[in-house]
Amino acid sequence: MALAWRKLRKAFYLETSLRILHLCPPSSCAPWISVPRLSLHTKPSMPPCDFSPERYQSLPYSRALEIHKQHLSPVETAYFQKPLLLHQGHMEWLFDSEGNRYLDFFSGIVTVSVGHCHPKVTAVAQKQMDHLWHTSSVFFHPPMHEYAEKLAELLPEPLKVIFLVNSGSEANDLAMVMARTYSKHTDIISFRGGYHGCSPYTLGLTNVGIYKMELPNGMGCQSTMCPDVFRGPWGGSYCRDSPVQTVRKCSCTPDCCQAKEQYIEQFKETLNTSVAKSIAGFFAEPIQGVNGVVQYPKEFLKEAFALVRERGGVCIADEVQTGFGRLGSHFWGFQSHDVLPDIVTMAKGIGNGFPMAAVVTTPEIAKSLAKCLQHFNTFGGSPLACAIGSAVLQVIKEENLQKNSQEVGTYMLLKFAELRDEFDIIGDVRGKGLMMGIEMVQDKMSRQPLPKTEVNQIHEDCKDMGLLVGRGGIFSQTFRIAPPMCITKLEVDFAFEVFRTALLQHMERRAK
């Protein structure tokens, strides 16, 4: 109902206003909100927003920057030359300390599933905080059991045993232990470009250069070629389960993908040369997130899972970014590959930003873990986390957000694919539902990554026009787009106009 009302209200906002040439914040928003100005082009006008943020009254920006330098991690993770100091959020919108409004098209790294501070989720959290925050699992409490029952209903048999934890890294840590205790083997395979966490254990699974260390970690993990149909050696125009295919040509028919066969041969090569005859398991994201929303050829995972099971291993689907309806066609990403994993890990969207995660597996695998390890988690399955998790599931269902992801996501992919046809520096547009990657290249022929400095400037320009997107890829060359699932087509149109304007500005700079 809430989503339907928002769509009805926004219908009165004419899409042609995206090209209006004057600058002023919508009258329905707080009058103190300022609009950053650009030097090259007038920015597209933002869609309306019916939320007025409170005036910022906390730390001055300079003081926050000083504290960050003195007391927080020196690892540079913040976006932009001048990192944003965010103040408040509402659904798909974010507000900074200076009053600027931004359309959030990255959802806190694919984490805010139903919208920032969604009123229903917030109300449930406030109510639970008034009753009981924490007990640990040495005591029973209804929110944990209610949530477990609801989550189990959304997974196919025999995936019915749930371990509640706090983060995606923690979930994948536990899944690794499960795979090894059940199989009684050690070796675990994961894709190059895959990201499965940054804990000492999962660093072995993660195969993105900036997360690799010179010191030993994650022993017993082996990487294999990522079947990337855009950047890899094989790929064509029928490979992906997506409304948008690569511009690479091939002689395949829609029902027979030669690239898939070639990548399967590479997977077999890994099995035959790089791991023991019997293995513990294989981790795969249904769509790679950190690597830039990379999709595999259709049917690849089905064949890979069969090969892994022949070696005694279990198959683990990492749904940390793809789960909970984001891909539109299915609630879980693995379902879009027509496979049934032995273990599923999930986090991020599970709690709409609240720290929460889960590992779901079969009774048989769960019992094998219990025989080997007295697994315990102090905060996993807390009353507050489980109440929030249940509220998120309820909102996804009541507001038809999976369907919205399918409809608006398909519209978004087809819309942004127009930019690939217009600009030679966009090599690929890919994805499914509300998870999209835009890979920037020097030119379509070479597919060489666009230099990071140039991608950074496009990123900055999008921010200056009120659009926040993410980054990914081995060379940080891909824009990652994954808005909250409450997004509308009108906001997609705005994002499209912003991104196109940023590209035009970039081409002007190049020409000079």
Image (cartoon, grey):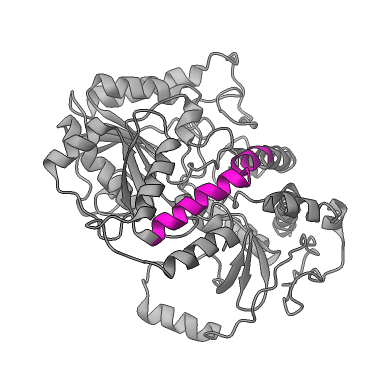
Viewer-proximal residue among 386 and 15:
386
**Farthest left residue?**
372
Q: Where residue 461 sits: x, y (%)?
A: 67, 62
Does residue 12 appear anywhere in the picture? Answer: yes
Quarter residue 397 falls in: top right
Q: Where residue 496 sits: x, y (%)?
A: 73, 50
Viewer-proximal residue among 509 and 423:
423
Viewer-proximal residue among 263 and 201:
201
- The answer to if 390 sits in the magenta stretch is yes
Position of 23 relative to 381 (above/below): below
Viewer-proximal residue among 159 and 342:
159
Q: Where residue 408 sits: x, y (%)?
A: 68, 42
Counting labels gives 0
In the visual, does 365 lie left or right of 492?
left
Q: What secondary structure predominates along the stretch shown in magenta? A: helix
Q: Quadrant of the C terminus?
A: bottom right
Position of 43 relative to 32 (above/below): above
- The answer to if 495 sits in the magenta stretch is no
In the visual, does 116 lie left or right of 419?
left
Quarter residue 401 falls in: top right
Q: Where residue 309 sits: x, y (%)?
A: 28, 22
In the visual, does 404 lie left or right of 390?
right
Q: Which residues are magenta?
A: 384-407
Position of 14 relative to 73 (above/below): above
In the visual, does 429 lie left or right of 363?
right
Does residue 233 appear anywhere in the picture? Answer: no
Q: Residue at x 73, y 47 (%)?
A: 489
Q: Residue at x 54, y 71 (%)?
A: 83
